[in-house]
């Protein structure tokens, strides 16, 4: 499997976008009808008649992340560490997102590590954090950086490491048609950025031992 390692710089945490005036459901469905006609089909034929309303409902799920402020969500969930001072690693959190360039699915896994100072957060909360950012229009670099920055800001750990591996359907089903290509992005903060040994410990824990991941910062 080809792996294009990409550590492009991108800015860290960004808040939920300012709320824009939302079109009505009827307007959104009309837009889907237009796209069906643009594709070359007839939105009034039987098989497509309910499609605009189904697509609009699907959008409510795929883009549910705009409703949530991940930082606030995490703030309510931290617990004291009870003196635990080892790296916490959560690997293979599956996510589904959509690229902001083509609105095509990005499907992948994200691995998170952090070295707590005095706060830890439950596994389900980390998965939920990923989901909130994933359910927005994204680029993989930004998703990776946002998850890292949010954990860093809320838990104030000694360091955060995030590695994301994903396939982009805008690359695999159209354009360059490169099935099997996985993009890898990473963000290393604090001790994971400054100490190669800690970084390697994390990479080994997620099964990427020996992988050279430069300081994604
Ligand atoms: Zn794309």
Image (tube, grey):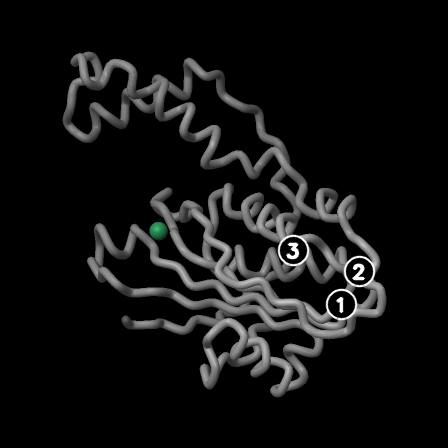
**Would you call the spot at circle 2 few (<14 residues within 10 Å), some (14-19), or many (20 or more)?**
some
**Would you call the spot at circle 1 few (<14 residues within 10 Å), some (14-19), or many (20 or more)?**
many
Mark 3 or 2, closer to the camera: 2
**Alpha carbons under labels 1 and 2: distance apart:** 6 Å
Q: Position of residue 119 (x, y in %)?
A: 80, 60
Q: Which residue is mark 1?
A: 116
Q: Is mark 1 within 8 Å of ligand 1?
A: no
Q: Is mark 2 within 8 Å of ligand 1?
A: no
Going from N to C along the chain, the mark reached first, 3 or 1, is 3
Closer-to-camera residue (125/53) = 125
Vertical order, 30 against 144 (above or below): above
Q: Quadrant of the N terminus?
A: bottom left
Q: On the rendered structure, is 14 left or right of 59? A: right
Which image quarter: residue 161? bottom right
Which image quarter: residue 9? bottom right
Going from N to C along the chain, the mark reached first, 3 or 2, is 3
- As helix, strand or loop, the secondary structure at mark 3 comes to loop
Q: Is mark 3 within 8 Å of ligand 1?
A: no
Q: Position of residue 130 (x, y in %)?
A: 56, 51
Q: On the rendered structure, is 140 left or right of 18? A: left
Q: Residue at x 66, y 67 (%)?
A: 88
- Are discs 1 and 2 less than 8 Å apart at CB? yes
**Would you call the spot at circle 3 few (<14 residues within 10 Å), some (14-19), or many (20 or more)?**
some
Q: On the rendered structure, is 64 left or right of 168? A: right
User: Which mark identifies residue 119?
Assistant: 2
Vertical order, 137 against 211 (above or below): above
């Amino acid at each position: 499997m080809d792996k294009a390692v990409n550590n492009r710089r991108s800015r860290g945490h960004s808040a939920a976008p300012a709320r824009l005036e939302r079109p009505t459901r009827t307007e959104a469905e009309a837009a889907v009808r237009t796209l069906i006609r643009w594709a070359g089909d007839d939105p009034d034929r039987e098989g497509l008649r309910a499609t605009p309303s189904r697509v609009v409902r699907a959008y409510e799920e795929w883009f549910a992340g705009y409703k949530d402020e991940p930082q606030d969500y995490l703030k309510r969930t931290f617990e004291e560490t009870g003196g635990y001072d080892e790296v916490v690693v959560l690997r293979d959190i599956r996510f589904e997102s959509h690229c902001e360039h083509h609105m095509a699915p990005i499907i992948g896994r994200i691995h998170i590590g952090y070295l707590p100072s005095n706060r830890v957060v439950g596994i389900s909360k980390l998965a939920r954090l990923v989901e909130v950012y994933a359910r927005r229009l994204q680029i993989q670099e930004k998703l990776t950086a946002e998850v890292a920055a949010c954990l860093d800001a809320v838990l104030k750990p000694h360091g955060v490491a995030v590695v994301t591996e994903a396939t982009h359907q805008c690359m695999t089903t159209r354009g360059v048609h490169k099935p099997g290509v996985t993009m890898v992005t990473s963000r290393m903060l604090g001790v994971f950025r400054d100490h190669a040994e800690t970084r390697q410990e994390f990479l080994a824990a997620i099964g990427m031992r020996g992988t050279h991941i430069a300081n994604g910062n």
